[in-house]
Image: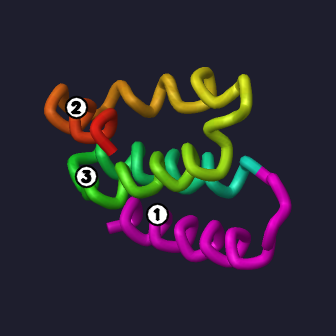
Amino acid sequence: MQFDSRMSNASEFVLKLLENIGDNFVRCPYLANIEIERRRHLHGKGDDEKFLDALIQYFVRFGHLACFTSDVEMFLEVLTPDKKAELWGS
């Protein structure tokens, strides 16, 4: 229960940050959102669609940067081969 509460609080905080950044190219809130979904997965409480959506949002906004690959590499480890294929097909 404590895990769920912490993740919920973290999600709310990150969503507020995302609302306030506007057109700025600040990567941290997007990465934090992906990390929250990764931790949910690691605790068996993940939602594949939310996780993929967070990765896609990050790609749309920052996929042109040289750091993109190194930023998301560790997050891809929690995806099943089928979900990886789905992501690459997006």
- Helix, strand or loop status at disc 3: helix
Tell me which residue sits at (39%, 29%) in the image.
76
Q: Amino acid at mark 3?
A: Asp
Q: Residues within 10 Å of mark 1 (few under 14, many from 20)?
A: some
Q: Amino acid at mark 2?
A: Ala
Mark 3 or 1, closer to the camera: 3
Give the residues in magenta: 1-26
Tell me which residue sits at (85%, 61%) in the image.
24
Q: Residues within 10 Å of mark 2 (few under 14, many from 20)?
A: few
Which picture quadrant has residue 83? Answer: top left
* Residue positioned most to the left: 82
Residue that badge 2 annotates: 85
Relative to 70, say whether 51 is above or below: below
Residue that badge 1 annotates: 7
Q: Amino acid at mark 1?
A: Met
Mark 3 or 2, closer to the camera: 2
